[in-house]
């Protein structure tokens, strides 16, 4: 039987990828259906109750600049906000917030339920309807079929998910949710390459059983950061502290003594885990010389007693988990509310995706999120937004949105995935971006809002605020340009006080701000620079643009050079073995990856600049 309605876009999965995908499609006015196993779990954080961090915060700001929801949701649910790397350069500064996971989920659900052009339906999808290599709809658990012109698949860790606690294991998509086994089975009839990955989560603790007097306290920033460019710190809920404890030699001894009961060390799990978020047993074995690891104790919310001990993700048996927890200072009598576990799941090789996140083999079918081998809410949400947008644009026959590496971390993420693939859970870092001085958190709106407006993603309010900010930046630059000081100015002493070397010639505000020792906040304390009602966001932008102008210009030159490479096409039937000088290994890598451009070829790991030069010389000779 067919469902009584047909849709332009169906999104399968209501996690972080699925919710952003559904919103992007609905915002761009396609009739959209979000199908998920359990409506109560829309926007559920499967693991750590936190959003952002280095690299991830950059993604959240970009999602926000493109009209996505994640930043707004965390602004309304964050219970501790911090700017990481605040003393370092602007490229690596990043916002992170601890979330009240109930408030976060409620915000997402409420927003989705009120989004025009979006329907939500609770059902498990067990198969896709495909005809002539083109998607036509989905089949539900209860046997009903639903027609759609395009489908976005965002099923996270649920495909053939298997939960491990010690040597016991059972089927599951995450604790409390069932795995998606039929869909996993059915997807394997298509030519996609797939593999197995794993991730894990720590046991949760009842705060009433913890001795907080023995723990160090950690507060958020005094001036609370805001995630959304249209956010307001007054919308943040009550702010509370986190705590810190440590593992010790006793903890490590317990872990070493029980390794044979770990599914990872006993060979029960084959899937590769996240290198940068290792389990406590991995940390103890990999860093055997360390006697202690810091554990951040993060409240799960304002209305629950549960605590998330960040740093002791484990799949050891429950009795060992109790021992591990109780070995740490402050946790001697702690009670576990939920056991930690590892989960193994299927993922699909993202090299079988185009840069639009559409699959290469089935037209109109898009993949986003953990299914593509990534880990993290932010990575999932970023892909979801692009996949939902492109599914919508596919239906309306508009050009696809592909962000380039110099335009956004989202571009870096998708290019890395679809060009290089991944063999371990992929997470974002600032070090993955070659143009990170351009890809800052603070300028994500300046980079992406205009293009997003053209694609119909942006609300009127956001567009108004954006234009206001741009205008304020220009006005502030002009104001600084027009304030002149010469060494004989009557009020020169006030300025010289800020400078390392006194003025020797006439300069304006821009020249003064260029000096490394001069900070904006001290400059505007000087009478002639003082102005009431300054737009502090615009001022921050002016300061960064002026101070880093030289570096930014140099990076723009590099981008221009790289863009020429990006536009140099490599035909799909290119015979790499006819290029003299390329080693067999390089030829086999090129044949394996089949890069579409010289730019992509240059990013394949192990490909040297010399190999790229040989290709360029060959192409030039061919004319
Ligand atoms: P998910 O958030 O998993 O959402 C998938 C959605 O699809 C769910 O709503 C589900 O109900 C729905 N769904 C599944 N199958 C079907 C179907 N057939 N039909 C309809 N709906 C379906 N990330 C980190 O960054 N660091 C970590 O340490 C970390 N640890 C983790 C530990 C565990 C145990 C788990 C489960 C996840 C962990 N993650 C971690 C990953 C993080 O949760 C994911 O990266 C993120 O949630 C992925 O988002 P997603 O939208 O792709 O999928």
Image (cartoon, helix red, strand yellow):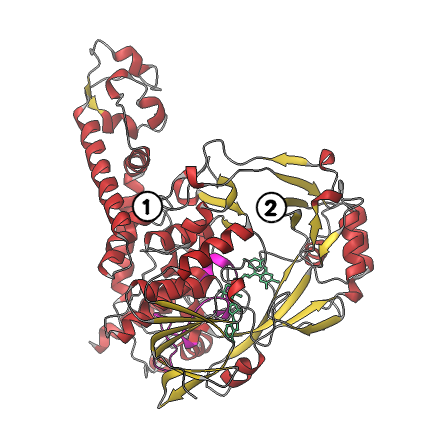
Indicate whether residue 379 is drawn in magenta.
yes
Q: Earlier in the sequence, mark 1 or mark 2?
A: 2
Q: Is mark 1 within 8 Å of ligand 1?
A: no
* Whether residue 514 is visible: yes
Which residues lie in the magenta part?
352-380
- Residue underneath mark 2: 303
Q: In terms of secondary structure, where does tag 1 sit?
A: loop
What numbered label is drawn on residue 332?
Answer: none
Q: Is mark 2 within 8 Å of ligand 1?
A: no
Q: Position of residue 61 (x, y in %)?
A: 39, 50
Indicate whether residue 210 is drawn in magenta.
no
- Location of residue 168 (image quadrant): bottom right
- Left or right, 222 with respect to 467, comes to right
- Residue underneath mark 1: 443
Question: Which image quadrant: the N terminus?
Answer: bottom left
Q: Position of residue 496 (x, y in %)?
A: 31, 15
- Left or right, 389 with respect to 608, comes to left
Residue at 55% from the left image edge and 66% from the top image edge: 424
Q: Position of residue 591 (x, y in %)?
A: 41, 80
Which secondary structure type mostly characterizes the magenta part of the structure? loop
- Left or right, 255 with respect to 500, comes to right
Q: Count residues near mark 2 (Cα–Cα under 10 Å), then give few for <14, some for 14-19, many for 20+.
A: few
Q: Count residues near mark 1 (Cα–Cα under 10 Å), then give few for <14, some for 14-19, many for 20+.
A: many
In three-dimensional space, the C-alpha distance between marks 1 and 2, rounded to whole angstroms, equals: 35 Å
- Location of residue 513 (image quadrant): top left
- Count of numbered circles on the image: 2
- Left or right, 398 with respect to 208, comes to left
Which residue is most to the bottom?
132
């Amino acid at each position: 039987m067919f469902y009584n309605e047909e849709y332009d876009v169906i999104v399968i999965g209501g996690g972080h990828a699925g919710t952003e995908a559904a919103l992007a499609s609905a915002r761009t006015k396609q009739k959209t259906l979000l199908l998920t196993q359990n409506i109560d779990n829309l926007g559920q954080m499967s693991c750590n109750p936190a959003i952002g961090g280095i690299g991830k915060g950059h993604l959240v700001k970009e999602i926000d600049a493109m009209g996505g929801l994640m930043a707004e949701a965390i602004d309304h649910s964050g219970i501790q906000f911090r700017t990481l790397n605040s003393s370092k350069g602007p490229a690596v500064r990043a916002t992170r917030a601890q979330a009240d996971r109930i408030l976060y989920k409620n915000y997402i659900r409420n927003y989705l339920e009120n989004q025009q052009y979006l329907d939500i339906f609770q059902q498990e999808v067990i198969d896709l309807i495909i005809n002539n290599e083109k998607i036509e709809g989905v089949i539900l658990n209860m046997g009903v079929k639903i027609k759609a012109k395009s489908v976005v698949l965002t099923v996270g860790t649920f495909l053939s998910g298997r939960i491990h606690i010690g040597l016991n294991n059972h089927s599951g998509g995450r604790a409390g949710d069932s795995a998606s086994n039929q869909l996993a089975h059915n997807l394997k009839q298509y030519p996609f390459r797939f593999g197995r990955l794993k991730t894990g989560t720590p046991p949760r603790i009842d705060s009433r059983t913890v001795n907080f007097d023995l723990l160090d306290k950690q507060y958020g920033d005094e001036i609370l950061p805001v995630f959304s460019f249209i956010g307001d710190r007054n919308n943040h809920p009550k702010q509370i502290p986190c705590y810190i404890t440590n593992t010790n030699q006793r903890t490590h001894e317990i872990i070493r003594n029980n390794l044979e009961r770990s599914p990872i060390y006993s060979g029960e799990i084959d899937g590769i885990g996240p290198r940068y978020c290792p389990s406590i047993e991995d940390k103890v074995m990999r860093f055997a010389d360390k006697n202690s690891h810091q554990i951040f104790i993060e409240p799960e919310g304002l209305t629950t007693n549960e605590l998330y001990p960040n740093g002791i993700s484990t799949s050891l048996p429950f009795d060992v988990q109790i021992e591990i927890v109780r070995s740490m200072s402050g946790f001697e009598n702690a009670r576990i509310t939920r056991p930690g576990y590892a989960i193994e799941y299927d993922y699909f090789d993202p090299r079988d995706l185009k840069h639009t996140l559409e699959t290469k083999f089935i037209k109109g079918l898009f993949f986003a999120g953990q299914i593509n081998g990534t880990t993290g809410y932010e990575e999932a949400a970023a892909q979801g937004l692009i996949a939902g947008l492109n599914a919508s644009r596919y239906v309306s026959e508009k050009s696809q949105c592909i962000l380039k590496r110099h335009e956004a971390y989202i571009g870096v993420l998708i290019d890395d995935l679809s060009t290089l693939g991944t063999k371990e859970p992929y997470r974002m870092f600032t070090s993955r971006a070659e143009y990170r001085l351009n890809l800052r958190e603070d300028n994500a709106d300046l980079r992406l809002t205009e293009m997003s407006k053209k694609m119909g993603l942006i609300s009127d309010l956001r567009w108004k605020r954006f234009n206001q900010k741009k205008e304020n930046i220009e006005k502030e630059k002009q104001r600084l340009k027009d304030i002149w000081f010469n060494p004989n100015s009557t009020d020169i002493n006030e300025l010289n006080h800020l400078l390392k070397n006194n003025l020797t010639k006439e300069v304006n505000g821009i020249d003064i701000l260029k000096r490394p020792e001069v900070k904006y906040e001290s400059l505007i304390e000087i009478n002639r620079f003082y102005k009431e009602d300054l737009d502090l966001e615009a001022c921050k932008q002016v300061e960064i643009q002026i101070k880093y102008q030289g570096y930014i210009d140099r990076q723009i030159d590099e981008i221009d050079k790289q863009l020429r490479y990006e536009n140099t096409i490599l035909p799909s039937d290119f015979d790499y073995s006819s290029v003299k000088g390329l080693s067999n290994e390089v030829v086999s890598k090129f044949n394996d990856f089949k890069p579409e451009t010289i730019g992509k070829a240059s990013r394949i790991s192990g490909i040297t600049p010399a190999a790229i030069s040989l290709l360029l010389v060959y192409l030039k000779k061919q004319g």
